Amino acid sequence: MDRQSVEEKLKRQGGVIENFCPFTKLMLVVCTAVLSILFGSLIYIAIISAVYIILSLAAHVSRDFLKSYFRLFIFFGLMLILMNSFFQSNESEVLFSMGKVSIYEEGFYRGCRMSSIILSVAGGLLFFTETTPIQDLMVMLGNIGLSSDIVYVVVATFQSITELSGRMEQILDAQRSRGIETDGNLIVRAKAVLPMLITLLLSSMVSAEEKAIALEARCFNCQGTRTALRVYKTTAADIIAMIVLALITGGIVVAGFIL
Amino acid sequence: MEVIRMNNLSYRYPTTEEYCLKNVSFSIQEGELCAIAGSNGCGKTTIGNIIRGLIPSFHGGEIEGTLEIFGKSSKEISADEKAKRIGFVFQNPFTQNSGIKETVFEEIAFGLENIGVGREEIITRVMDIIEMLKIESFMYKHPLELSGGYRQRVALASIIVQNPEIMVIDEPTSQLDPKGTEEVFEIIKLLNRQKKTIVLVEHKMELVAEYADHIIYLNEGTVLLDGTAEDVLANEILYKKNLEMPQVARLGFQAREKGLMIEKVPITMDGAVKIFAKYGKCVKDGGGSHGES
């Protein structure tokens, strides 16, 4: 163990996209959100999906990202389009009809717009979490002047997902060993959820108290200036990326209104 | 020099009517490893929490009597000062992580960041502690990926790095396997050698017998015995009242009851081997089949 290797480990670890400042990645989310509100359509969905797929491949997070994005696409994107198309008629033109089921033009376009917004924002945030180490987020929130308490709550919330999933698995195993059926049809699974949730909630409450004591022992509540082991700065690449994003978004908006 | 003095302290939790500590008095000297021992529910952890300052500020309840730390009343010591000067490690290794750090190195550095230590010094101090506790092999692992024993070592490292004058360690191995227990006690032994004042709350009497310089033995919220390990754990009162004591000490008393007049009651395994070896040798020398078997 030497100091140089420690310093290396404290730097951002990852490729070009992962090394972008979290603000740059958040700007991508904001830009896609603005464009989806203005130009949400079926073509927009195709383009934004292609953009996220390319970005996730470039950032080497495609496996996890695409799995979640696909679920998002099916359960929210596609469902919104279908629900609106079938039930939002307002006496508008029928685009497609099969027996008693019809797809209405107004509902279809409205569904596409809503789906565009959901996929842009949720997909962007998904990409952000996949490519942003929690430490980056923590430093970023600290840099913008948020209090250490708020930073802790935000970051701990992200981290607790892993902890809670682990604990949930333990509870499930314990319940299975006591004869509670947790696998099977929907009703069987639904019956198993309540006792599991109550146990998870109670154990989380106990953990929260102990965590508060652990934080107290680490001087978390002490007054005074704090320091940080990781120090990140906005790089030239970040500034260039932000300018490019702003120009692309601005260009599309202007072109959209002119054309 | 005396660093902790408790005078006639009584305490009850907010949800109970009965006092769990009754007129407890003792003192702890600087640099000693003092074990607060006794069976479950006797008030050991409560004493640890009072010294650390979590009672009454965190848990509430009613407290009577006085506690002096560093020569002044604990009421005069601010919460910040207590956090900086009195380290605290407790039982559960799974909840003692900050929950926001991604490597063990950063987890250990967390306390130093909170008290505003400069970045360069943080790195130096964390590297020193990692080397001292021999935890280099998992210093870049995620704290949540570690086993209970490793997590407890990280928890200890995270407190030791803050360099507190007193360390309150509450049953650090109650959830660990024998290997994890051994590793954690190696660290405690190391701290003891460095003359750090340690208040060890522990019910495993074998460990207490082996490591403690001074034992305060509690029973039903009162101090039953106070003295060196030998004075306390080889005291007949524990045997007569059937209280927690090392197995070898119990064996010693049982041997005396059976007529084997051993010169003293052992409290550690090594001590027992030395004492009983003499008698084994006598029997063997006498040519009896018992000795040979």
Image (tube, coloured by chain):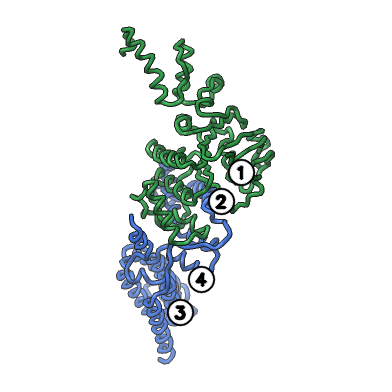
Q: Amino acid at mark 2?
A: Ala
Is B46 placed above or below A131 here? above
| Residue tagged 4 | A144
Instruction: Measure how far apart labels 3 and 2 are at the Cα level.
Output: 48 Å
| Residue tagged 1 | B69
Mark in the foreground, 3 or 2: 2
Could you tell me which chain the residue with mark 4 belongs to? A
Instruction: Measure how far apart labels 4 and 3 are at the Cα level.
Output: 23 Å
| Residue tagged 3 | A34
Is B85 placed above or below A14 here? above
Q: Are marks 3 and 2 in contact (CB under 8 Å)?
A: no
Q: Quadrant of residue B26?
A: top right
Q: Are marks 1 and 2 on the same chain?
A: yes
Q: In x, y percent, where is residue B7?
A: 66, 36
Q: Amino acid at mark 3?
A: Val
Instruction: Measure how far apart labels 3 and 1 are at the Cα level.
Output: 60 Å
* Visual hue assigned to chain A: blue
Q: Are marks 3 and 2 on the same chain?
A: no
Image point 42% across, 71% down: which residue? A233
Disc 1 secondary structure class: strand
Mark in the foreground, 4 or 1: 1
* Visual hue assigned to chain B: green
Could you tell me which chain the residue with mark 3 belongs to? A
**Left or right, B255 with reference to A147:** left
Q: In x, y percent, where is residue A241?
A: 38, 78
| Residue tagged 2 | B83
Q: Amino acid at mark 1?
A: Ile
Disc 4 secondary structure class: loop
Circle 4: is it few (<14), some (14-19), or many (20+) Cα within 10 Å?
A: few
Residue B50 in view here: yes
Mark in the foreground, 1 or 2: 1
